């Protein structure tokens, strides 16, 4: 298993992370709900997980976890996660009725206040139903990552390569 040490800057960010300062980056996007639902109206979560997993090779860091070096003799390293399961990273939730923007803000705030699981790759995607209330026609897409995995611009690039249906010729 190949390993790559964290950069000194990322090691510093990891060191200063604590429950009061999560150092996570979050993004919220909205998508038309109809193509994401099955005939019964449920989100096609398994299909979305498969879609994302098929594109993760474009951003290999999303399949890696951090491992500490014994006795802190060196900076932590990135290792391929042999137990990687996309279901741990791509989840769905329905906002409590009546849903809407206020409920979405509450959900995102609570989500970003909790640490990511340190034994897994440091990212999650949440598909959020009810962002427009009970009669809404959009689904929220909440992405959160630890800052050691990506900064704002690299996260945007990775998200576009993973989520978008771009051609191989586009660079993703």
Image (cartoon, rainbow, N blue to C red):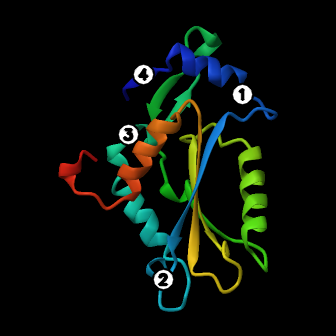
Circle 1 is placed at which residue position? Answer: 17
Q: What mark, if any, has residue 70 been given in the picture?
A: none
Q: In the rendered view of the protein, which quadrant contains the N terminus?
A: top left
Mark 2 or 3, nearer chain start: 2
Circle 2 is placed at which residue position? Answer: 34
Mark 4 or 1, nearer chain start: 4
Circle 3 is placed at which residue position? Answer: 60
Do the residues under discs 4 and 1 have CB atoms within 8 angstroms?
Answer: no
Q: CA distance from mark 4 to mark 1?
A: 20 Å
Q: Residues within 10 Å of mark 1 (few under 14, many from 20)?
A: some
Q: Residue at x 64, y 37 (%)?
A: 118
Q: CA distance from mark 3 to mark 1?
A: 23 Å
Answer with left or right where residue 82 lies relative to residue 108: left
Mark 3 or 1, nearer chain start: 1
Q: Nearer the viewer, mark 4 or mark 1?
A: 1
Circle 4 is placed at which residue position? Answer: 4
Q: Residue at x 40, y 43 (%)?
A: 157
Q: Residue at x 53, y 91 (%)?
A: 40
Q: Position of residue 80 (x, y in %)?
A: 43, 36
Mark 4 or 2, nearer chain start: 4
The vertical placement of 101 against 8, above or below, is below
Q: Nearer the viewer, mark 2 or mark 3?
A: 2
Answer with left or right where residue 43 lies relative to residue 63: right
Element type at mark 2: helix
Q: Position of residue 18 (x, y in %)?
A: 77, 29
Front residue of 59 and 75:
59
Q: CA distance from mark 4 to mark 2?
A: 42 Å
Q: CA distance from mark 2 to mark 3?
A: 30 Å
Q: Residues within 10 Å of mark 2 (few under 14, many from 20)?
A: some
> Does any portion of residue 81 appear in the rendered image?
no
Front residue of 15 and 166:
166
Element type at mark 3: helix
């Amino acid at each position: 298993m190949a390993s790559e040490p964290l950069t000194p800057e990322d090691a510093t960010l990891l060191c200063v992370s604590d429950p009061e300062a999560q150092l996570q980056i979050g993004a919220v996007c909205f998508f038309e709900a109809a193509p994401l639902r099955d005939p019964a109206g449920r989100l096609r979560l398994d299909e979305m997980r498969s879609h994302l997993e098929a594109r993760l090779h474009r951003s290999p860091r999303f399949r890696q976890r951090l491992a500490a070096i014994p006795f802190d003799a060196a900076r932590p390293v990135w290792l391929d996660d042999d137990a990687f399961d996309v279901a741990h990273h791509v989840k769905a939730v329905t906002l409590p009725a009546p849903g809407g923007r206020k409920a979405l803000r509450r959900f995102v705030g609570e989500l970003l206040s909790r640490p990511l699981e340190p034994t897994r790759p440091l990212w999650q995607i949440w598909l959020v139903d009810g962002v427009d209330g009970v009669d809404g026609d959009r689904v929220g897409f909440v992405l959160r990552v630890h800052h050691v995995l990506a900064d704002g611009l690299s996260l945007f690039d990775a998200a576009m390569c993973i989520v978008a249906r771009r051609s191989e010729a586009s660079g993703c």
